[in-house]
Image (spheres, rainbow, N blue to C red):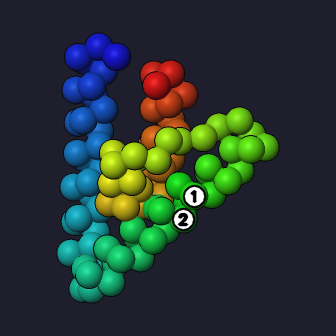
Amino acid sequence: MSVWSWILVGVIGGGGLLAVVAALVRSGRPLRGLISTALQGLCALAAVNVTGMFTGVTLGLGWVTGAVAALLGLPGVVGLLLSRLIFAV
């Protein structure tokens, strides 16, 4: 990937992270929201990898994908899938 692609992914990911943090703070229960978001994201990542046997679409489990899934939740996993589709990573 080129440098500009990495910058674009970083800006979009940073904006998503900022939106999630703002929503957690507004909810009144940020820790509970963070834990539920992390669990949903990690379950979505596991579901993508389990169904990958049938669809052929999988995401490798590393520290970056795990962190994105845990911090951004389901939108993070969808973003990882879209970035894999667009950038052929």
Above or below for 23 versus 5: below
Q: Position of residue 53 (x, y in %)?
A: 74, 44
Q: Position of residue 22 (x, y in %)?
A: 22, 66
Q: Is residue 37 left or right of residue 7?
A: right
The amino acid sitting under disc 1 is: Ala
Q: Secondary structure at mark 2?
A: helix
Residue 37, quarter of picture:
bottom left
- Mark 2 and mark 1 residues within 8 Å of each other at the beta carbon: yes
Decide: few, some or many residues near mark 2? Use Cα within 10 Å; few <14, some 14-19, many ≥20. some
Q: Position of residue 50 (x, y in %)?
A: 67, 53
Decide: few, some or many residues near mark 1? Use Cα within 10 Å; few <14, some 14-19, many ≥20. some
Instruction: Look at mark 1 in the image and give the residue it sits on.
Output: 46
Above or below for 67 versus 37: above
Residue, far right: 54
Residue at the spot 24% in from the left edge and 85% down from the top edge: 28
Residue at the spot 24% in from the left edge and 46% down from the top edge: 15
The residue lying toward the viewer, choosing from 88 and 16, is 88
Above or below for 36 versus 54: below
Does the rendering let one see residue 68?
no
The amino acid sitting under disc 2 is: Cys
Q: CA distance from mark 2 to mark 1?
A: 5 Å
Q: Is residue 67 left or right of residue 46?
A: left
Q: Secondary structure at mark 1?
A: helix
Q: Point out the image quarter for the N terminus.
A: top left
Instruction: Look at mark 2 in the image and give the residue it sits on.
Output: 43
Residue at the spot 33% in from the left edge and 84% down from the top edge: 32
Numbered mark located on residue 12 in the image:
none
Does the rendering let one see residue 21?
yes
Residue 64, quarter of picture:
top left
Residue at the spot 25% in from the left edge and 79% down from the top edge: 30
